Image: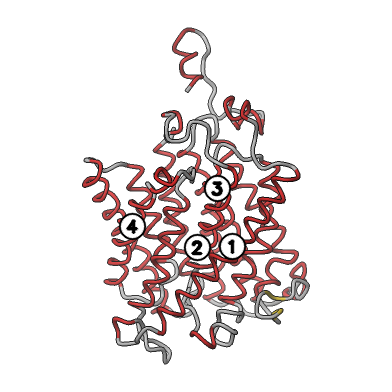
Amino acid sequence: MQLTAQDVWMMVSAAMVLLMTPALGLFYGGMTRAKAVLNMMMMSFASAGIVGVVWVLWGYSMTVGQGVGGLFGNPFASFGLQDLLGTSDLVKAGYSATFAMVTVALISGAIADRAKFSAWAAFVPAWVTLVYAPLAFMVWGGGLLGPDGALGSVFGPVIDFAGGTVVEISSGTAALVLALVLGPRLGFGKDPAHRPHNIPFVMIGAGLLWFGWFGFNAGAATTAEQAGLIWVNTLAAPVAALLGWIATEKVRDGHPTSLGAASGVVAGLVAITPACANVSPLAAVALGLAAGVVSALAVGLKYRFGYDDSLDVVGVHLVAGVVGTLALGLVALPADGADGGLFYGGGLGQLVAQLVAVLVTILLSGAVTLVLAAAIHATIGFRISREDELAGIDVAEHAETAYEFALSGTGGAERMRA
């Protein structure tokens, strides 16, 4: 079988998306305390390792092929990917694996600094099997929310080109549930030690995420015209979101921040993910601006309601994911016989379809995550001890430290206490 340009582009895109998981570790690691950065990065790396194995064995099979009640594919249909040898579908399997890896890793930001590594290692394969793979099948594999699915045929198929529901809303919902189950960090909202310890890490991580996101959104493009639209939209939305976020900070707090700029970029990327192939560049700018403002406001809700979403997974991924998914009901371009969004005269049909998909995603991810968290909490326990949290999770869970400081003199002692 001859290698096609599309195969090559998908393999390159898969490598770009794979980079997003360690990039996320860098982004999240910079936002934690100095004595929790290694654990944060390890949670991302562990997600890649565990999900990669699951995907080869049964994960990919659950997202394609003959469905079980429209909910998931037969886990044994392509077990071990043996039947894909000699076909271009093997490239698609590898590409889809990188999506699953980064999706699960996103959740870890909500439970930074306090989750047992063993509990996370148990949660990852269960969640990707019971939440991510079924959602991928429902949206992309011809399942419940597709054109011929039980809900898609009634309310209309959801538009989600690269993962607003499957990736962003599902991970954001799971993050909220885990944050509630584990409870807040010691000193949450009061201890200044919980401020990000390395903002340059955060900004470098955001830059690498942005780079990888071009493969994330455009890797499945089938024509040069579609790829071009996706590429431009993946540029336009995050730059607008960056400006929206720091403008909100300026009005609210009196100054824009580097952390806000990096978070704004990610919020814009999240919002454009479901819409990248189905909106105009002008709409992408408007969508990004809206996501930046709304997410900047949403991250503060954790202090009002008392849930400790440590690294703002809920405020960025859940909120911006909902914004981007629902916006398609308003600004989706007419294409392939579809009427488009409300602003193009398409009526409320697409908005209803998008809303149904959002609700299904939140209900599935929320319910399954709650059951998994409760089961892990009741058996091996999900949270580290108070003593370990005070001492630092890096030492407690990994017997390592990210930084070695000289202990001679008062200055060294002060740096260690930081």
Disc on res. 169? 2
Q: Nearer the viewer, residue 354 or 50?
A: 354
Considering the numbered disc 4 on the image, is that residue within a helix, a strand or a loop?
Answer: helix
Considering the numbered disc 1 on the image, is that residue within a helix, a strand or a loop?
Answer: helix
Identify the residue under disc 1.
Answer: 365
Badge 2 or badge 3: first in the primary sequence = 2
Give amino acid for label 4: Val
Depth check, mark 2 against mark 3: the one in front is 3
**Quadrant occupied by the N terminus:** bottom right
Q: Position of residue 404 (x, y in %)?
A: 54, 22
Badge 4 or badge 2: first in the primary sequence = 2
Q: Position of residue 102 (x, y in %)?
A: 56, 56
Disc on res. 294? 4
**Separation (CA) of disc 2 from disc 3:** 17 Å
Determine crowd level at label 4: few under 14, some 14-19, many 20+ residues with C-alpha closer than 10 A. Answer: many
The residue located at (72%, 58%) in the rendering is 53
Give the left or right position of residue 280, taking residue 396 as reference. left
Q: Is residue 292 above or below residue 217?
A: above
Give amino acid for label 2: Ile
Badge 4 or badge 1: first in the primary sequence = 4
Identify the residue under disc 3.
Answer: 180
The residue located at (30%, 87%) in the rendering is 345
Quadrant for residue 348, please give it: bottom left
Q: Position of residue 207 (x, y in %)?
A: 41, 50
Give the left or right position of residue 392, taking residue 264 as reference. right
Q: Nearer the viewer, residue 302 or 240?
A: 302
**Separation (CA) of disc 4 from disc 2:** 15 Å
User: Mark 2 and 1 residues: CB-CB less than 8 Å, in contact?
Assistant: yes
Disc on res. 346? none
Determine crowd level at label 2: few under 14, some 14-19, many 20+ residues with C-alpha closer than 10 A. Answer: many
